[in-house]
Image (cartoon, grey):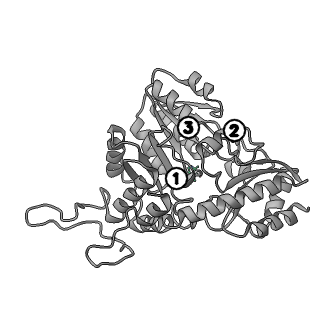
Amino acid sequence: MHIQTLAVHAGHDVDPATAAVTPPIHLSTTFAREADGSYRGGFLYSRYANPNRSALETCLARLEGGAAAAAFASGSAATMTLLQAIGPASHVILPDDAYFGSIKLARDVFGPWGMEVSIVDMTNPANVSQAMRTNTKLVWLETPSNPLLGIADIAALADIAHRGGAVCAVDNTWGTPVLQRPLELGADVSMHSTTKYLGGHSDVLSGALVFKANDELYQRVNSIQMTGGAVPSPFDCWLVMRGVRTLPLRVHAQSASAMGLAEFLAKHPRVEAVHYPGLKSHPSHDVACRQMSGFGGMLSVQVKATAPESIAIADRLELFTQATSLGGTESLIEHRASVEGPGTRSPANLLRVSVGLEHVDDLKEDFDRALGG
Ligand SMILES: *Cc1c(COP(=O)(O)O)cnc(C)c1O
């Protein structure tokens, strides 16, 4: 089935109790036992499983072409749970350009628990080969990466990870299952901050891990999910499901507008560089063409300006709200270096853009005016 069809139907069943077409939200934390001690719907207590969460997990597994999924209270909780499942006294490899919270989790939270962490430039697979150790258990990819839109070759890196006996996980938040299929390219796990494109409306914090196989790693994650309880609320799950129904439509529109805006900005005299994998000038454009069916709604622009002037440009934009996060219907812009703080790798003149659903010509016009062009 095509992803448009899955987005509408996967995990969406007519409610058996009431025939409601839109699913009810099951707030109950506990479920009644039958006389024989069994549970009619298979649900016992909401930390273990809940009808809304189970529906979301079914939906996400099918969207990614996976065998199982686990939903969490945030993307970061999903990442944390995977690292917990990988276990202490192991070595993990992360990309140098990645969501700063993922690096922080591995290095600052799990480091003191005995996890060894290597941070490498993954745009060149040879760097990952060199970083592999006998105790490497996880190669974590983020592609396109945050905030420089670097592209990592999923198939090549999954192969390197597997040859070294490690798991390959991909943060597919920016790619989305609409444009990028990590599990089909050889990865074992696809991770999402469903707070972003899957939720799609900047109104729900949640995350997920999708597994290629219902294997021992999934079982361990599921056990930590149920025992640790970093789970999304039933309403959070309901909101993500609602968002997913329009995911393919939104992502294709945002991707097309991002391409148009990137091309416009690349030619603008006040712009130093545009980072967007859809541009032929992007250093990994060929890899992006191979593994993505579209290039997504995120781009970064380095303006010809100092840090304060860059922030002033972002502030002059009327259609782009200065705010962190991405993947909503409204366009957002962010001076990433100020958000990440000291130690950031973001250039001082870099503005990260999440393209919304506005008309691309209005977005171009807004930028032209703000840049003083
Ligand atoms: C936002 C984001 C995260 C973290 O997700 P939360 O839902 O904020 O915890 C991880 N990876 C990427 C690429 C993100 O954009």
The residue wearing badge 3 is 154
* Separation (CA) of disc 1 from disc 2: 20 Å
Q: CB at mark 2 closer than 8 A to ligand 1?
A: no
- Residues at marks 2 and 3, CA–CA distance in whole angstroms: 12 Å
Name the residue at 42% across, 45% down: 81
In terms of sequence position, does the residue under pointer 1 or pointer 2 come before the other? 1
Does mark 3's beta carbon lie closer than 8 Å to ligand 1?
Answer: no
Kindly identify which residue carries mark 2.
284
Can see residue 30? Answer: yes
Q: Secondary structure at mark 2?
A: loop
Give the vertical position of 6 relative to 106 (above or below): below
The image position of residue 343, as x and y in percent, is 70, 40
* Pick the front one: 369 or 77: 369
Question: Can you identify the residue that label 1 sits on?
Answer: 177
Q: Are marks 2 and 3 in contact (CB under 8 Å)?
A: no
**Amino acid beneath label 1:** Pro
Residue 308 position, x and y percent, is 84, 54
Callout 1: few (<14), some (14-19), or many (20+) C-alpha neighbours within 10 Å?
many
Q: On the rendered image, what quadrant is the N terminus found in?
A: bottom left
Q: CA separation, marks 3 and 1?
A: 14 Å
Q: At 67% from the left edge and 41% from the top edge, which residue is drawn?
A: 150
Query: Where's residue 18, x and y in %?
Result: 28, 79
Q: In the shown orientation, is residue 151 left or right of residue 241? A: right
User: Between disc 3 and disc 1, whose residue precedes?
Assistant: 3
**Residue 68 placed where, x, y %?**
36, 49
Furthest-left residue in view? 36
Give the quarter of the image for residue 254. Answer: bottom right
Element assignment for label 1 = helix
Q: Is residue 136 left or right of residue 356?
A: left
Residue kind at label 3, given as amino acid type? Ile
| Quadrant the C terminus occupies | bottom right
